[in-house]
Image: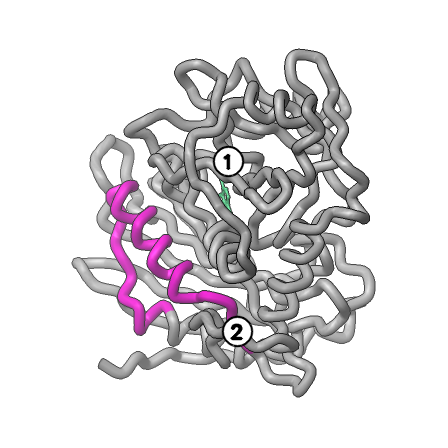
Amino acid sequence: MAISIKITKTPQSRIGDCDFNNIPFGTIFSDHMFMVDYEDGEWHNAQILPYGPLSLSPSTFALHYGQAIFEGMKAFKTAEGEAQLFRPHDNWERLNLSARRMAMAEIPEELFMSGLKALVDLDRDWIPTKQGSSLYLRPYMFATDEFVGVRPAKHFKLIIFSCPVNAYYPKPIRVIVEEKYVRAFDGGVGNAKAAGNYGISMLPTAEANKKGFDQIIWTDGVSHKYIEESGTMNVFFAMGKKIITPALDGTILAGITRDSCIKLLREKGYEVEERKISIDEIVEAHQNGLLTDAFGSGTAAIIAKIAAFNYKGVEYTLPNPEEREVSNWLYNTLYSIQTGATPTSFNWIDKV
Ligand SMILES: *Cc1c(COP(=O)(O)O)cnc(C)c1O
């Protein structure tokens, strides 16, 4: 099946207005977007058009019932000036996993990849080349039925747009262990990239910010004793050559960066355990001087070092971020693979 995409180019590129040395995260959008609509059981009208406002009915289904999912991924420029994507098939697979959980239409691989690549190809000059930067891609899908009444929607719109970004978290983060609010329960939607998962995190995060913390460490919804993840990132803790991270038990998001970290660490000879991790275990490791590193992993930040964590009002400060063996190595290795500076034996790179 050949995918035909109707392309309407912008009459006037906005790229001259973009200061690539100073891009506030997520505020500058490239010239074009990809859009495709689902109706009568099929995807129709694949097109690329100038990035711009949508016209939606006030009764648009997703706006009241929350059938909305998204992805986050990146395109990079190699030193030779080639454009490449990092693990895009994994994002496609996860988008469909989210779609199934939210009773939304799945998108065929060829349609997703063709739209994605055509968009990155057309806007390739928007991929920044400064150290730490990339073109962030945001695929998302939402229900467009004009309908009031609760039943799964029948119409969906998938859009992909992009924003050039510099390094996301300039500084190591201070986090607080959350013991009041819950992000996800067994049988819920914690492992889907559902828009609502972020909606419910805004108040807890704002409260943590007010107390001076950058992010929350979510805990399990039953006992608040086990670590889940942090904001938009999965979390890792290092005790010398042993690295631990919470297992994918259905309530946390299966991060592609998480998976990349695990594979790279194992290849390098680290012992990585995916299992339940209690906060008490981390506190004890800290008190015994065994906790050498802690960090979050996610597409936006790649690796965000945790400078300190707060649990029950006690602040636990981790070793100097500059001297962190694991997180520094992972960040440099991943970014270097993503930009093509270091070859990888994993099948992670897709040229555009
Ligand atoms: C997207 C996301 C992550 C990170 O996933 P990556 O594929 O590594 O970007 C982690 N946690 C949550 C809740 C997320 O939504």
Locate residue 23 relative to residue 80 in the image: left or right: right
**Residue 300, image x, y percentages:** 61, 53
Residue labelled with disc 1? 198
Identify the element where label 1 is drawn. helix
Say above or below: 314 vs 23: above
Q: Residue at horizontal 77%, vertical 37%? A: 319
Say above or below: 149 vs 57: above
**Does the numbered disc 1 mark a residue whose Cβ is under 8 Å from ligand 1?**
yes
Locate residue 17 relative to residue 331 in the image: left or right: right
Question: Distance between the Cα atoms at labels 1 and 2?
Answer: 33 Å
Say above or below: 214 vs 78: above
User: Range of the magenta residues?
Assistant: 84-112
Q: Can residue 24 be seen here?
A: yes
**Residue 246, image x, y percentages:** 46, 36
- Looking at the image, which is closer to me, 215 or 64? 215
Magenta stretch holds residue 28:
no
Q: Which mark is residue 165?
A: none
Q: Quadrant of residue 194?
A: top left
Q: Residue at horizontal 40%, vertical 16%? A: 222
- Looking at the image, which is closer to me, 25 or 88? 88
Q: Residue at horizontal 22%, vertical 81%? A: 1
Residue labelled with disc 2? 344
Identify the element where label 2 is drawn. loop
